[in-house]
Amino acid sequence: MRHDPTRRAFLQQVAALGCSAAASPFLTPIAMASAPGENRLVVIVLRGAMDGLDVLRPTGDAHFAALRPSLSEGGTPLGNGFFALHPVLSDLAPLWQAGELAFVPATSTPYRDKRSHFDGQDLLEAGTPDDDAARARDGWLNRTLTLLPGVTARTAFAVGRERMRILDGTAPMTHWSPGTELDLSPQARLLLDYLYGQDPLFSEAGLTALEMGMASGMMEDQGGPAGEVLARYLGEQLRGETRIASLSLSGFDTHVQQARRLRPALRNLQTTILTLRAELGAIWARTTVLAMTEFGRTARENGTGGTDHGTGGAMLLAGGALKGGRVLGGWPGLSEAALYDGRDLMPLSDVRAYAAWALRDMYGLRVSDLTRTVFPGLDMGDNPGLLL
């Protein structure tokens, strides 16, 4: 493998991206597994700490505009008018009207205060309490597979040298990496051509980006709709034997100029969901999509028009199986006294509980198994009735 100056410069740029490689925009890992039944589950990890207060804007909160003078205007009103959808996500409004879109504001994992992308993402994918995340060697989706009868795992598929932790574990999975010989479908070849074909520099250096295990889905800055390519590929698999899939999208680390920098990431998320819906056709009625992030961002915008690492965030749910058109879980308020540590949106719920209830309703898993095996020590609370 050559190491010429051009290639070294490229890799130096890769290493310098964002505040950590956890938010780098060069590769989206995909993992899939087959499971019994006809229900489909897609989990999207939104890397970089998506700002839930910008995605689902609490315009009805009297303190919102003062905290965010440049990040509070516009949007599509939802429900009773208290919340508004970010303007870039306006094409999702028909899903809201059809009951195929829902949100959980003020939610988080158990992760607190340290605000590291890597640690936060590890905790999100491991699904364990904060103190146990570093010791966990598997992910919560893989532990789910161990509880399902008749799992064949014909496809447990990851793109990149480093597996997505969320589906890593004892349940069988296939891992694709450079040099592996697979009988790839036309959609799979299209995906790889897309990843490596943008320009000669990226074509050569992309293999090393894979070796470094860089996680991302934001190829939009490189000139194309990554969400559409990925969702078409996933749609092909989900129309076949695959029942559970996970992918990651990044570009959500918005410390500066958030009004501009968040837009590509949200367009990519919107495109991913809408393309999945179109590709799955009638199967969409049996599909649930859970989009979650490692933590939220500060309630106040900073001096550069961005937001910094925070605590409470938001979860997005979509799918034809969803009982949507709702904002779930309550609202803590944005007054000074209501903020977590005087700076962040106060989390009212554990994002793992919503994932657990979705798994329970989709696969009939027992609450005791979910709280002992899939999400150890989790208090699931009351059933929010996510699915039809």
Image (tube, grey):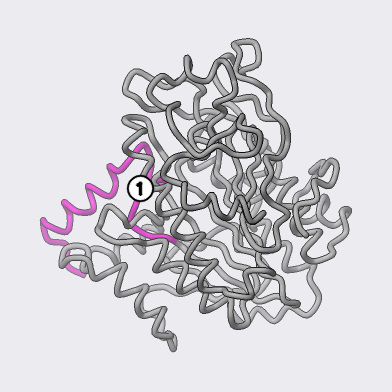
**Outermost residue toward the top in this view:** 337
* Local crowd size for mark 1, using a 10 Å CA cut-off: few (<14), some (14–19), many (≥20): some
Q: Position of residue 103 (x, y in %)?
A: 63, 43
Instruction: Tell me which amino acid carries mark 1.
Output: Pro
Q: Which residues are magenta?
A: 1-28
**Residue furthest left as drawn:** 5
Left of 12 or right of it: where is 290?
right
- Residue at 39% x, 68% y: name it: 229
Q: Pinpoint residue 194: horizontal percent, then vertical percent.
A: 30, 70
Q: What SS does tag 1 mark?
A: helix
Residue 21 shown in magenta:
yes
Q: Residue at x 64, y 10 (%)?
A: 337
Q: Is residue 249 magenta?
A: no
Q: Above or below — where is 114 with respect to 38?
A: above
Question: Which quarter of the rendered picture does the N terminus lie within?
Answer: bottom left
Task: Tell me: residue 134, above or below residue 342.
Answer: below
Residue under circle 1? 264
Residue beneath the point at 47% across and 60% down: 272
Image position, residue 147 (x, y; %)? 80, 67
